Amino acid sequence: MSSEVAEFPLPADVTEEERATAKREIGKHAKILGEAGWKKADVRRWLHERLQWPVRELLPGRDGGEGLPEHVLAKFRDPASETAMIPKFRAPENIKVVVAGGTAGRFSAIVPGWTFSKGSNLVFRRILR
C-alpha cells in the first residue's frame, strides 16, 4: 500500500495549513499498514477471511435482517444448525480498498456495494469541484 497521497481538490476557501493537514491525515491508515508491509491485496484477503458468518446466523428474520435468500438456504439440509461459513464477498478481489479522507484524523469506513454482483460493477471516480 503506497504511503503517498494523491492530490485531490479541496474547496477554494481551505487554507494552506488545512490543505497540508488534510494531505497528512488522509494517508495515516495507509501509512500504518504500508509500514507493516501490507499491500491492498493483503487488506482484501484479511477482510475476506474475517467477513464470513455461519449459515445458521444468516436466517431470514434473525436480528431483524433479511438473511440469506431461500434458494441459498435450500442447499442446506438444516439451515438452522448449519455451521458452513458464507463469505460476505465472493472473492477478495470484490472488496474495494480506497484511500481518502480529510482533516479530522484517522478514520476508516466500509462502503457497502453489491456483495454478489452479477452484472453491475462498483465504480469509484474522482469528483472535481
Image: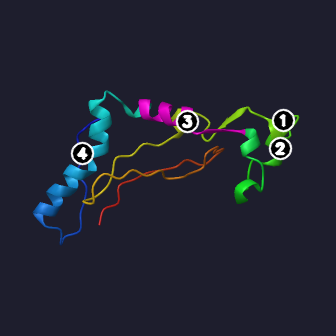
Q: Which residue matches tag 4? A: 5
The number of numbered discs placed on residues in the rendered structure image is 4
Q: Earlier in the sequence, mark 4 or mark 2?
A: 4
In this rendering, the answer to whether 75 lies above or below 104 is above
Nearer to us: label 1 or label 4:
1
Between the residue at mark 1 and the residue at mark 4, the CA separation in whole angstroms equals 46 Å
The secondary structure that dominates the magenta segment is helix
Q: Characterize the local packing of mark 4: few (<14), some (14-19) or many (20 or more) Cα atoms within 10 angstroms.
A: some
Q: Position of residue 56 (x, y in %)?
A: 76, 41
Label 2 secondary element: helix
Q: Earlier in the sequence, mark 3 or mark 4?
A: 4
Residue 75: assigned label: 1
Q: Which residues are magenta?
A: 42-54
Between the residue at mark 1 and the residue at mark 2, the CA separation in whole angstroms equals 7 Å
Q: Is residue 87 left or right of residue 14?
A: right
Q: Residue 123: tell me if it is visible.
A: yes
Q: Position of residue 50 (x, y in %)?
A: 55, 35
Q: Is residue 72 left or right of residue 122?
A: right
Q: Which residue matches tag 3? A: 50
Residue at the spot 36% in from the left edge and 31% down from the top edge: 39
Looking at the picture, which amino acid does disc 1 mark?
Lys
Label 4 secondary element: loop
Q: Earlier in the sequence, mark 1 or mark 3?
A: 3
Looking at the picture, which amino acid does disc 4 mark?
Val
Between the residue at mark 4 and the residue at mark 2, the CA separation in whole angstroms equals 44 Å
Quick check: marks 1 and 2 in contact, CB under 8 Å?
yes
